[in-house]
Amino acid sequence: MTRLTSESLVGINKELDEYNMELLRKTGCTLRGIASRAAGVAETEVRDASSSAPVAVIPITSGEGIIGHFSQAVQSIVSYIGFASFVTREHDVAGLAEGIREGAKIVFLADDNCFVAMNLSHRLVVDNAEATARGYVAALECLAGGLYSRDVLVIGAGQVGRSAVCTLKKLGAKVAVFDINQAKTEILLREYGVLKEENLAEALQRYAILLDASPAAEIIQAEHIKANTIIAACGIPLGLSTEAYSLVKDRLVHDPLQIGVATMLAMAVK
Ligand code: 2YC
């Protein structure tokens, strides 16, 4: 699990309008639209729930501790989707108690290994890895104009990659997976009947629809980008070389938190 940096989060709240307009221009969907689609709920349901489900974000000091701007970034995304939200003054257990006392129905909290949203009234727990996978598959679906029977290459068979494979198969996509650890792709091959790709550079010559869920940098180079290449890249850092990015940036979706958090919220309001 890649740990976010404070530098990658500091500008999120000020740039959400610009980010949303860019997402709409590229995919035809807004952040709330993609999150609703990913959660399998109508966007009106998410909007209607916003008035009755205040959200608390609780800073957690365990392990490597608080990431500067992390709670504020999560809170600004939740607020942008239309929910009343606040970062608790206290952290850890006292923060959770404060959030509930202040009337929160949904709480967001993350330690080094687990980032969840919890709907306290519906007893629902939503994990960031699954939400990120579903949100990025929804973004890829919008970019591609549908994924049924389309060839999709998933790079990375970790928590997010595995969940993306499951979601893509449900959409009827023809899924191939690459991971540097062949044992991980073997598991997905057995579980989901995916195709196993053993050589990434060679596979990238043959796929135009990519979901990059790997933490590796610079694995997608300019020679892998075709005129019809589209990429949903949830891995941190972005796995494209600078030249590859310049060639495909209008057909690429990538962010450090936005789609994952917005989808967690849409999945938690059900
Ligand atoms: O500020 C805080 O409350 C910290 N405890 C937050 C730690 C988040 C660690 N996880 C990450 O950086 C990312 C997640 C956003 C998803 C996967 N890794």
Image (cartoon, helix red, strand yellow):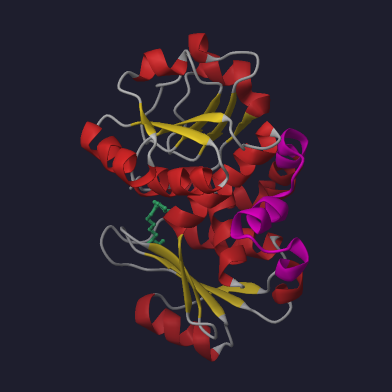
Q: Residue at x 70, y 40 (%)?
A: 23
In the picture as drawn, the residue positioned furthest to the top comes out as: 223
* Pick the front one: 97 or 90: 97
Which residue is at the front of the view, 15 or 125? 125
Q: Please give left or right for residue 251 compared with residue 260 in the image.
A: right
Q: Position of residue 136 (x, y in %)?
A: 56, 44
Q: Which residues are magenta?
A: 22-46
Confirm whether residue 45 shows in the render: yes
The correct choice, above or below, for 34 with respect to 60 in the image is above
As for residue 131 lying within the magenta part, the answer is: no
Identify the residue at horizontal 51%, vertical 87% (top origin).
Answer: 100
Is there any visible trace of residue 4 in the rendered image? Answer: no
Q: Is residue 84 above or below residue 130?
A: below
Q: How many marks?
A: 0
Task: Give above or below for 107 relative to 36.
Answer: below
Looking at the image, in which quadrant does ligand 1 appear? bottom left
User: What residue do we see at 48% from left, 82% from top?
Assistant: 123
Q: Position of residue 6 (x, y in %)?
A: 45, 48
